[in-house]
Amino acid sequence: MIKLIFCVKRLPKLSRGEFQRYWRDRHGPLVKRHAATLAVRRYVQSHTLDNPGLDFAAAARGSSGKEFDGVAELWWDSIDSLLAVAATEGGQAAAAELLADEARFIDLPNSPIFFTKEVEVVG
């Protein structure tokens, strides 16, 4: 399996709560609707928590821990399966709709996105 990781930062005009509500309640169902067309095997949203008691982990590493508002993870069976669906008209239309929606709430130029292969260390 391969995984896409998308470290998402909200548009400056949105509060974190507004961003997370839109992401969960509007964008999440849109991804779910297109999952089969895009051959997405799994989709997880990880929403950043606002709890000062949890700042210790970032502070110990010299980070503010406030750079991102969440992380999206999407899994595919293989690179080949992702590339195959990306070459279809339906896949391209679904991807375009998702990207247009992302532009409504995500600061896209400041939200890194990359593909990974998991290496399990503790399972």
Image (cartoon, rainbow, N blue to C red):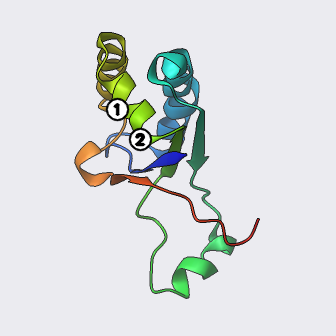
* Residue occupying image coordinates x 50% and y 50%: 71
Furthest residue in direction right, as rendered = 123
The picture places residue 31, in percent across and down from the top left corner, at 50, 24
> Regarding mark 1 in the picture, which secondary structure is present there?
helix
Which one is in front, 35 or 118?
A: 118
Q: Which mark is residue 83?
A: 1
Q: Is 24 or 98 nearer to us in this picture?
A: 98
Cβ–Cβ under 8 Å for marks 2 and 1: yes
Residue 123 appears left or right of 37: right
Residue type for callout 2 = Ile
Q: Give the residue at the far front of this rendering.
A: 80
Q: Residue at image x 38%, y 45%?
A: 10
Circle 2 crowding by C-alpha within 10 Å: few under 14, some 14–19, many from 20: few
The residue lying at 56 percent from left, 59 percent from top is 118
Q: Is residue 102 above or below residue 107?
A: above
Q: Which mark is residue 79?
A: 2
Residue 36: percent from left, percent from top: 54, 18
Percent of width and height locating residue 84 = 36, 26
The residue under the point 31% across, 46% down is 12
Mark 1: give few (<14), some (14-19) or many (20+) Cα within 10 Å. Answer: few
The reply, left or right, for residue 16 in relation to residue 82 is right
Query: Which numbered tag is attached to residue 24?
Result: none
| Disc 2 to disc 1, C-alpha distance | 6 Å
